[in-house]
Amino acid sequence: MQNEKIYDLTGRTAIVVGAGQSPGEGMGNGRASALLYARHGARALAVDRDFEQAQETVQQITEAGGIAEACCADVTEEASLESAIASCRERWGSVDILHNNVGVSLAGGDAPVTEITEEAFDRVVAINLRGTVMACKHALPVMREQKRGVIINISSMAAWVTYPLVAYKATKSAMIAFTEQLAIQNAEYGIRANVILPGKINTPMAVDTRARVWGKTRAEVEAERDASVPLRKKMGTAWDVANAALFLASDEANFITGVALPVDGGACVRVG
Ligand SMILES: NC(=O)c1ccc[n+]([C@@H]2O[C@H](COP(=O)([O-])OP(=O)(O)OC[C@H]3O[C@@H](n4cnc5c(N)ncnc54)[C@H](O)[C@@H]3O)[C@@H](O)[C@H]2O)c1
């Protein structure tokens, strides 16, 4: 008989890097994922550069009866990631799930290739790609010793479809290759690594940041983004991304590694 209690993360720990969210309305992908992991029994370490945002996530988890701690770390500083991962192990004895959610585009100064500055390109690479690599660098020795662990990386559908800004495109594409490398090089240790490609999701970062930068209302940006989604002409929500992450993190995905999973309402299968 299959265990009736599916997606059970009881006894596991989950580090969500980028567990806060950008200012604006609604729910961010990292926060929703931390909430879902905790709701399914994991102890969650909510890591964010913005400590107040991480604390807000922790408050929402503890109010719902879950266990979580907030941790301040900037993914551009390797030492702060190293100590976040060490603190999870010291506090709870293991590092079972590492979820790398941090990603910026416009907010990092990203631009089309003819306009990008060295500074902006390096900043986006450091935040989106190097930060994930460094978090994995410090989580993997613990996971290898445990002979188990799950890594969930958050890329973007921008890796596969037309996208105008160069640094986001390049880093989110690299996340896929990096995840495949992680999967194959750590398979013998029982560690799984998968990458999620969100499409158009209605998060504060995606909608409110664009409204601010483009001088439009939230409703205008929402309408434009909704119209471009094949499924129901409606963006996804952070819960759609979090549910995919929960599945990949759970034992129900025990034989799945090295996969790039679109969560995009059909955007990647529309051609022309
Ligand atoms: N929202 C979408 O439509 C969409 C689409 C595709 C991919 N994604 C990806 O999903 C992820 C999350 O998106 P979101 O919309 O929830 O974003 P968000 O901005 O709400 O959440 C990201 C979190 O990362 C934190 N962060 C930023 N820089 C950091 C740093 N240097 N160190 C530590 N923390 C830092 C922010 O404070 C924030 O809390 C990103 O990787 C994004 O590229 C989102």
Image (cartoon, grey):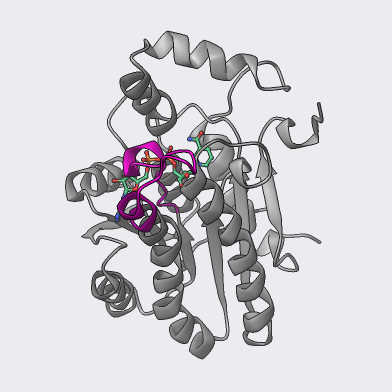
Q: Residue furthest front?
A: 114
Q: Is residue 95 visible?
A: yes
Horizontal side, residue 162 vs residue 100: left or right: right
What segment is highlighted magenta in the picture? 101-123
Q: Where 249 sits versus 65, above or below?
A: below
Residue beneath the point at 53% across and 44% down: 242
Front in this rendered view, residue 248 or 218: 218
Q: Where 245 sits versus 9, above or below?
A: above
Q: Is residue 43 magenta?
A: no
- Which quarter of the rendered picture does the N terminus lie within? bottom right
- Which x, y percent locates residue 123? 33, 55
Q: Is residue 122 magenta?
A: yes
Magenta: main secondary structure equals loop
Q: Where 80 sits versus 185, above or below?
A: above
Q: Is residue 14 visible?
A: no
Residue beneath the point at 24% across and 41% down: 56
- Which x, y percent locates residue 34? 41, 50
Front in this rendered view, residue 233 or 106: 106
Residue beneath the point at 33% across and 49% down: 120
- Which x, y percent locates residue 216? 37, 12
Residue beneath the point at 45% across and 61% down: 129
Q: Residue furthest left?
A: 52
- Which x, y percent locates residue 163? 59, 37
Numbered label tally: 0
Horizontal side, residue 109 vs residue 179: left or right: left
